Image (cartoon, rainbow, N blue to C red):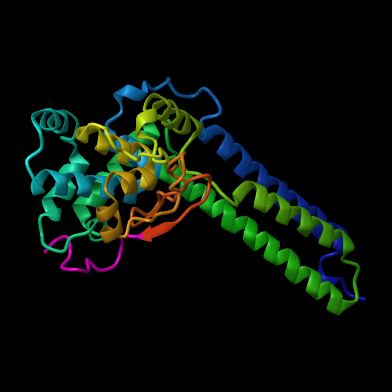
Amino acid sequence: MEPTWGIEGPDFLGWYLTAGCLLAASVFLLRLFTGGLLPLYRKVDPHTLAPLDLAYLSGGPFHAVSVSHWVWTHQSSGQPSTEERRFLDANWQDPLLQAVAGTARYPGSTPKSCMAEASVQGQLRDRHRRLARLGLVRGRGVMLGLKALKWAIMLLLALGVVRIIAGMLNGRDFINLVGAVMAGIFAFVVLTAKIPAITQPGIQILRELRRENQDLRPDKTAGYAGVAPFRLAVGAALFGAAGLWTAAPAYASAMGVPAAGAGASGGTYYGDPVSTSSSSSSGSGGSSSCSGGGSCGGGGCGG
């Protein structure tokens, strides 16, 4: 009886296990060296980060654009107090905010439509690169590499399944290969099921600043009652979608801000930064996505 595909079972199994171990080790090491678990970067002072840096860390690109859009809308729709004006002038002269403000002035603009603007996407890419240099998020190249390794493992698992079926049809022994494929599926789930863009130092910064700003916790019974108006923007940035929903529920509802993660922890960016037209905001590890690509819709951000 001819061996399946002209390759003896033990030879194929040895090659298969070697390839699987190399791919799994590559994912593990890449996650380890880029996840902030090793002291490869200088410690970042949380208080040196701009509010929109925190918005990006807590909710990703879409949340950073949503907070920018809301802040600009708030500034242009009324007369902020002197204290609030001073805070906004000092803290929100941010290139991303300026890019959003340059397009949000058109009727019908929304955060989603602004995500489609080239100037906004350019600022989001710059923001991600800067945060990656600080070790707070994984770089776009790293995320692309992890995604490629994930697909390679999927293809290897598919090859194993096809080999098992071919072995069954050929009357060959395939039990050992079944065990190898099952082990590969387990490794795939553990290593690639959720690869957060934010690193451990980024998560620690959010935790530290959230502890310092307990009065801005979205799960407070009184909400943001009694909180100084200019600090609402800090809560919206720091606590992800939950913070924005608490600071400006009417705005969040009208603009389609995802309500997931409205718990005490706020959002934490577990999305994919490779495409600035997608984002994720999650609380307690969950996620929800909002696409910012496609058409500008609703009059468009660009008019």
The answer, for residue 41, to whether it is visible in the render is yes
Quadrant for the C terminus in the image: bottom left
Residue 31 drawn at (x, y percent): 56, 39
| Horizontal side of residue 136 vs 64, given as left or right | right
The answer, for residue 15, to whether it is visible in the render is no
- Picture quadrant where residue 127 is located: top left
Q: How many marks?
A: 0
In the image, the segment drawn in magenta is: 291-303
Residue 50 drawn at (x, y percent): 27, 31
| Horizontal side of residue 139 vs 170, given as left or right | left
Quadrant for the N terminus in the image: bottom right
Question: Which residue is located at x 84 percent, y 79 percent?
Answer: 169
Residue 244 drawn at (x, y percent): 31, 46
Q: Which of 73 and 225 is in front in this view?
A: 225
Q: Which of 5 and 43 is in front in this view?
A: 43
Q: Is residue 271 above or below residue 221?
A: below
